[in-house]
Structure formats: structure tokens, C-alpha cells
Image (cartoon, grey):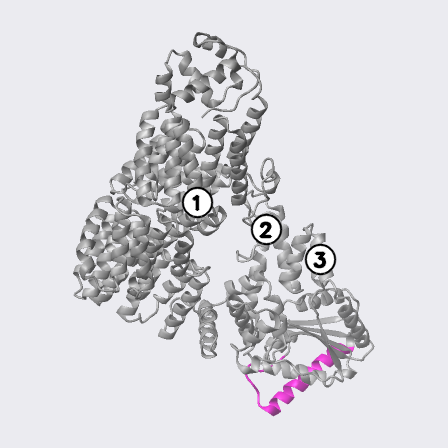
Amino acid sequence: MTHVLVERDDVLRAVAAAAARARSGRGSWLMLAAPPGRGRSAVLDTVVRRAIPVNGVRVLSARCSPEETAFPFALLRQVFPGADGIPFTDPAAEQEQEVFHRLLDLLARTAATRPVLLAVDDLHCADPVSRRWIGYLARRIAGLPVLVLATECREHSDVTWLPRTTGVCHPLPPLGQDAVTRLARERGLTPEQGAVCRDATAGNPALVQALLADLAGSARSPDPTAPGPGQAPLQPGGAPPARYRDALARWIRHRADDESRHIALALAVTAQCSPATGSALLQEALTLCPPRHAAAPCAPRLALLLSHPLALEAVLDAADPTELAALHSRAARLLHDRGAPATAVAAHLLHLERPREQWMARCLEEAADDAVRAGHTEQAAGLLRHALRTQPPPARERHADLTLRLGSLEFPHSAEAGIRRLRAGLDLHPDHRERAAAAPALGAALAARGRTDSALSVLHRASSGTDDDELVHVLRTVTALISSHDAVAWRDAIAGLRTLAPTAPPSVEPLVCGLITEYETGAGLLSAAEVLARIQPRLAGAPVHPRLRTAWLGSAATLLQWADRLEDARALAQQGLPVPPTPPDLTDAGLQCLLSARAEAALWAGDFRRVIAENTLLAHTCTGRGIRAPHLVSMVALARYELGLRDQAWQLLSTPDETTADSSWEWNELRYARALLHGYEGRWQAALDDHLACGTGQSARDFVSPVATPWRSGAALALARLGRAGEARELAEEELGHARRWGTPRTVGRALRAHAAAVGGRQGLESLTEAAALLEGAPAPVERVEALIDLGRARIEAGLGRRGREDLRVADAEAARLLSPAGVADGPGDGGTDPAAVPTGRLLRATRAALRDANARTTTRARTGPGALTGAERRVVDLAAKGHTNAQIGEALHLSRRTVESHLTSSYRKLKVASRSQLAAGLAGTDTAAGGPRD
């Protein structure tokens, strides 16, 4: 323990000087006064050990303990073990004087032969009579060869008073930072460990010794699973190191006086829950203590010590849980009465095993609301769980409401736990009307979990269990919305809504109309203009029922998005969704719709980064916690692919478990997204398979329109690339008919592009020209860039190189603009925007490849040989070489007879042949340059 005496040379010198005076007959006393752990006993023991070998010094020693404080003369019986006449009870005053005088005379006679060192440890624990005798001796010691060396805890409430004329009180300050650092270095510890020793001990030698031993032991530990050097004490919130923890525990449980322990526990309780630090934390903690403790000298020192998490954890571990709970309860009450924020009050209430008063439950609810607004739903759920533990429990209706709220909060983090909680809340509700009103939350949760049948069953039971006509209409409409996840139920629900529509209350009718309009749009029965004529007046009309607000906004936003009113759709979504960081309630079917509409509107607008920023966390959270979200996953995956993040996109699309797929529209969105990615990468058969699977799913829902998942266009492109032109043309023409019926530039332009791929030739060029013109200025940037790429290639192949390259440069600039974070790209140059200025996404790669091909084709145009042929010329020559007549070639390629003749004439010149019979040999000649790819 020699290390404890670091920085104690001054006190040892003072003791030596006092001892020298005593040997010369000038006695005195010296009190080593310090808080616990400062090494009082160690200094005293060192002095005693050094004094024993000194010739002529007699040592009388005693160590006081709290167990003997109540025994009169207990200390003096240790000092004078053989003395007679020391009573065992408190004597009368005159008898006490007689005993005191006799013992003083005994000490004087003992010191007459040899000087005496009277060493008394922990004088504050001595019995009162013995302490009075020490004072009696101190007043008469000046003429005796005696040194009284005593230690006393100056945090103790009952300190010993001794006359300053015959002695001094010598403090023992904490160890300095340099001393602690030196001790740590001598133990072979790292600088980080040394810093922990310095900060977590406040220079208390006992704690320094304990923590040094802990750290040195962990560094030498042969156990490979043991913490490495410094790891254990460097992790706040974990278990404090053993010796260090035990040292603080001994002080809290056995050695601290009531004042010190109370202040330490108050500090610990306050530090657990308050963001305050330093003097502010101390002042807050002292409000939990009796007023007399406000000026306690130990308070600042304890505040410094407990500012370190290791000390805080050790004190909390050692404290009596009942005492801590009482302090937390008192702190919560004081904060509540002072009007503190509910979050601050709840921080203390969470440390109670269960709240005992209703104000506590209300405060926990308020704190949960604050946590939700801040986006901390798991924290909010924990607060509501604690509120439900209140004893006595809240009234049944309030208990049911709390349970339902908790279920909504738990659902995003554990779908099954949330569903069970929502069921419990419904069962608890004593009021049938309130139970019915709460049923949509459970229905939406079940549907999001993929259990649409159960969701519809819950809603049907709820509507049959109430006689409130308006509520019945609300429930029937919500049921129809949730039915969209089941093809058969959706068709039946729409039939029911058509019956309901003429008599629907004004507060319900807009959503009834919206859902019917969604169905009729999908069935190809309406144009975009007709849809807008239905929806826009209702948006401007009377408000809907509060329980239908988000569902109505979701339906309207979906229809506006389909009609290419993307900004209006996003505005409705923002109007209905909570303001971040408050998360959306996923047990609200309307909010689910708004999330989908917001994401797809941003994707269609080419705002890929917004799609990712707004939806990535939600998509990952849902799929990881048992909530299916294939539509959101699809939107994020497509946005990532457009930005060039191919691997991330495919990984996302593989996340939803399609083995659990039902007939929900969301799975068709996933199949469509996957088909697009296959097509982008040239896997045309896989693309075709997924497009057809999407089409099968949509057809089962009577959804034939290309407004949402234009699978026919995708399938036609795939069939054309696979050489199945007839099938491609059939699908493309069917799609074009539906698109023209809907009438928006996006749907028509997209269908025209697919039609061009299917028919090729002059007719294909005409379709692409129309598509590009339609899409110019339309809010469909992705479709416009794709159409311009195809148009540019087609014009170049048709011999219109200048115009084709201009189309490609425009497409390149627009593709770059989509990737620019600021939404603005540099003006088009020879190759468009500088490739280093923006990331390389899918569309930009496509435009750059097309421009490279166009430039290569330009350099070979004046040459001869098969490489000099344009794509159109090569297709004509291939058929002619196989023996087809001009009429047959024109019919196959949809070209006029004159155009076929023109292509053949040009080809004869380039191949240096004079007749059709020489074409095969001319094609077998060596290319003089690489031609561009032929679609």
C-alpha cells in the first residue's frame, strides 16, 4: 500500500516535527482529517510502524468502529487495557472527572519513563465519553512528552473539537492528476487507462488503488474472453471493475454518514435522468436532500467524483433499490410540481418498478407523445408500457386507449407484437362504438403483415357490432381500401361502394368516389381528364370524416400521380403525412397509401435522391420487422439503379419474401420493377417472364390500364429483342390503345416507344417521333430520355445522322440533369455534360454509349464493305440475300417498295456488287470499320 502515500511527505514531516517536540517534553495533538478514502489509516499505520523501532518511544494505539460507539469507555479500554476502575456505564459528572484524572495520571506516569505516541484511528467512531477524555487530554498535553495522532472523517456529522492552542488539524488533499498518471504508468497501463484512473477516482487514493489493481489485473488476464487492457472501465454503462466497485460499495453501505450517502445517492439519481452537469447538476440534486445538507462540504467533491460514469454506475449498483426508488419518486414529484417538461419527469418515473399514482401515468403519456414527435417511437413505446404498469390501473377505457396507442408504436418494430397489442386494446374497450372506431388500426396492421383475410374479418365484425350509421359507412369504406390487397375482395368491395355511393354521407362520399375511380381507372374505363374532373372538386369541397382524412388524401394523391399531376400528388402526401422527424403511423391504411404515392411521384419525376432519402429507412425497417412493403422497396430499388447503384438495387429487390405473396397490388409493383432491371441488363427472357407475371396479377384485379405498371410495353420490348416481332406488335398495339384512352404524355409516349421497337422501320420512326414530341415538357423525364435515345439511334440508322446525334445530345443533357444534385446540368456540348461533373447513372450511361456509337458510325460512313451499311440497309440486304422479293421485304419491315429499292441501291454501291445474287458474297467481305450495334 506504499503507493497510497504518494504526495504525503508534508504530513509525514509535520508528524515527525510534532514527535520531536513530544520527546523534548512539549506534547501536542495532530489530527489527520479527511473524507473517506484519502488514506488516513494508511498514514497513521505508517507513522506507527516507523515509531516502533525508535528507541524510547512507547506506542499506545486504538482503532474505533461504529459497532462500539455506544459502549462507554470502549476506546480507552483499548488504550489502557490493564487499567482498573474503568466503568462500563456512563458515569455521573463527578465520577467522570475522577476517571478522567486517574487515566491522565496513568498516561503521565507512563510517559515519564518514555515518550508516548497515542495513535487513534477513526476518532469520529469513538464512544462519546472517550472522545471527551481525548479533549480533556488535549487541554493538558502541553507539558507532557505525549503526541496524540488521531484520524477523523471530516464528513462525519459529529466531529471532535480539540483546542487549537495545543495542536493542529492537518488535511489530506486528493492525489494530483500527475501523481495518478505516474502511478498508472508505473503499473504498465496505457495513457487511456491512466486517464480513466484520474477521472473516475477524483484523486481518492483508495479508489485509485482499487482501479489500478483492476486494470493491471485485466492486462495480465490469461483468459482470451476477458476484456483487454482498459476495456472494462472504458465502457460507460457496463459493470464497473470489481475492486473499484467494491470500494465504493463499502463506503456507501458501511462507512458514509447519512449526509454523505444521501447526497451521493441524490447526485446519482439526478445524473441518471438529467442533462445538467457541474454545478447545475449539484444544485438539482441538492433539492432532493434535507435543507441542512445544502451547504455540506462533501457535496462538490462527490459531484466531481460522480461526474464519471464508472463512479455513477458503482454507486447505483451499491445503493438500496428502495432508497433509489424513493429518490426518483421525490425527484419526479418536484419536477412535476415545478412544471418541468414531461420528458424530464418521466425519466425518473421509468426507474420506479411501477407508477403508483395517476398523475405519473399521465406524465408518461405526455412524454410518449413528445418522443413520437421527435421520431423516437421505441422510446415512446417504453414510456407507454410503463404507464400501463400503474397501480391501481387506469380506468378500463383509458387502459384500452393506451394499449391501442402502444400497439401502433410497437408495430413498426415488431409486427406480431404490435398486432397482439392492438387486439388486446380492442378486447379491452367497453364501448362498442369506440371498439369499432379502433378496428381500422388492427385491420391496417394485419394487411401490412400480409393477413388481408384476417384484416377484413376484423373490420366486418366491427361494422356489424355498432348501430352508428356514419361509423358503419366509415368502416365499410376503410374495408374497401384494405380490400385492395386482395383481388377478389377488391372487386366485391367496389361493387358494394357503388351501391353505397348514392346514399353515402358527405363526409364519406369523397373516399367512396376515390376508390371507385381507382378501380375504373385501372379497368381502362376513364381518361385522366375524367378522373381530374371527379377528384379536384371534391378536394376543394367539404372536409371528409376525420377517420377517413388520410385515406381520402391517399386515394386522391394516387389518382393525381397517375394523371401526371406529380407536384399536386406530393403536396397532398405532405399534407397528410406527419412532419419529420415524427414517423408515419403504419397502422393507418391511409398513411400507407400516402407513403406509396409520395415515393412513386418522386420516382416518376426523376427525383431519385428524394426517393432514397425519404423511404430507405422505412423500407428497411418494415422488411426487417415483419411488415411487407414491396412497393416501397421497389421504388427505392429503382431509384438506386437509376443512380448507378446496381448491387444495392438488386439486393433490395431480393428482400421481400415472395413465397408469401398474395394478390395484393404491391407484389405486381415488385415484379414490374424486377422486370425493368432485367431489361436494363439485357436479360430479355427474364424480363419477359416478370412482365407477364405482373400482367397476370394485374389482370386478376381487372387492372388493364398502363397507368401504374405498363407491363405490356415492357413485354413488347422484351419480345422484340427476342425476335418475336408478331407477339411484340400485338401487345404494343393493345397497350397503345389503353394509353391513348388515358391520354397522358407519359403513358402514350411510353407505349409509342414500345410500339416502335415492335414494328421497326419507317413506322417505328414515326412512333418515336410522336413519343418524343409528346414527352417534351411533360413531367416524365425518364421516359423522354429513353424515347430520345431510341429516336436518335433510329434516325442515324435511317441516314438522318445530324438530327439523330442532336437527339442524343439532348437526351444526354437531360440525363445528366436528373443526376445533378442541384437539378441543373451544364449545357450540352459535343458529348453533353462533362462525365466527371455528375455520377454515372443508368440513363447517362445509355446516352453516352449511344453518342459513342453515333460518332463511330459517322467515321465509317464514307467507307465500303458490310460495316458501311446502316442498320436499315443491313436488314433489307439480309432478307434480299436470303431470296426475299422487294414486296416481301417491304411487308416484313413495314417499308414502302420505293424505300426498299433505295436501300438496295445504296447497299450495292457500298458492297461493290451489281446484282442481288452477289449480295451474299458482298456481306461475307471483311468490314473496314466497326459499325454500331443494331437493335
Given residues 927 and 260, the one toward you in this image is 927
Q: Is residue 425 above or below residue 632?
A: below
Determine whether label 2 and label 1 are within 8 Å by CB: no
Q: Quadrant of residue 244?
A: bottom right
Tell me the SS state at disc 1.
loop
328 vs 35, left or right, is left
- In this figure, which residue is indicated by the disc labeled 2? 231
Q: Which mark is residue 780?
A: 1
Residue 181: numbered disc = 3
Q: Residue at x 41, y 55 (%)?
A: 570
- Whichever of callouts 2 and 3 sits on the residue coming sooner in the sequence is 3
Camera-nearest label, 2 or 1: 1
Label 3, secondary structure: give it.
Answer: helix
Image-based side of 324 in relation to 893, left or right: right
Q: Which residues are magenta?
A: 84-112
Quarter of the figure with residue 538: bottom left
Q: Position of residue 136 (x, y in %)?
A: 68, 85
Q: Tell me the amino acid under the disc marked 3.
A: Thr
Image x and y of residue 68, in percent: 55, 75
Classify mark 1: residues with Cα within 10 Å, few (<14), some (14-19) or many (20+): many
Q: Residue furthest bottom?
A: 94
Rendered position, 605 above or below 70 = above
Q: Is residue 412 above or below residue 487?
A: below
Q: Nearer the viewer, residue 187 or 467?
A: 467
Residue depicted at 59% across the width and 43% down the height: 827
205 displayed left or right of 10: left
The residues tagged by marks 2 and 1 sit, at their Cα atoms, a distance apart of 56 Å
Query: Is residue 491 rendered to the left or right of residue 199?
Result: left
Residue type, label 2: Gln
Q: Are marks 2 and 3 in contact (CB under 8 Å)?
A: no
State which tag comes first along the sequence, 2 or 1.
2
